[in-house]
Amino acid sequence: VQLQAYGGGLVQARDSLRLSCAASGGTFSSYDVGWFRQAPGKEREFVASISWSGGLTSYADSVKGRFTVSRDNAKNTVYLQMNNLKPEDTAVYYCAAQNRLYIGRYERPYDYWGQGTQVTVSS
């Protein structure tokens, strides 16, 4: 399956942004999807994930209550709604997918990765 993350941009603190992860080339509805991000000079970190059905989600503590992950399997797309953005949310955001019934925070189980989209939050 091929993934394409898009929707990033330059916003101000407390603004909102919605990222999309569009999939092609596979049965997307059978894949769990995770969002990860990498800030300059830092390791990539887990942000949020959603199960293949959308029934289970998981969030990093740093985004809990501000970010919401959802999916529309009819459109082969997963979304990351980001509200009340902070400068520390500045990073390249990646989506990843796997069909191992896993929505945890470790990268290894994820087999497919998108190319990333830049999110910059100014203060």
Image (cartoon, rainbow, N blue to C red):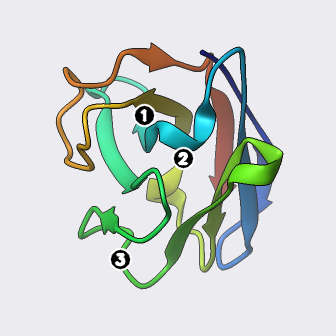
- What is the secondary structure assignment of the residue under circle 1? loop
Q: Position of residue 103 (x, y in %)?
A: 27, 49
Depth order, front residue of 101/107: 101
Which mark, by number, is residue 64?
Answer: 3
**Closer to viewer: mark 1 or mark 3:** 3
Q: Amino acid at mark 3?
A: Lys
Q: Circle 2 is placed at which residue position?
A: 90
Q: Position of residue 99 (x, y in %)?
A: 36, 31
For the C terminus, the image quarter is bottom right
Q: Residue at x 66, y 46 (%)?
A: 120
- What is the secondary structure assignment of the residue under circle 3? loop
Depth order, front residue of 68/30: 30
Q: Circle 1 is placed at which residue position?
A: 39
Q: Amino acid at mark 2?
A: Thr
Q: How many C-alpha atoms fall within 10 Å of the one at disc 3: few (<14), some, or many (≥20)? A: few
Q: Residue at x 66, y 79 (%)?
A: 14
Image-based side of 71 in relation to 109, left or right: right
Q: Amino acid at mark 1?
A: Ala
Residue 106, visible in the rendered structure: yes
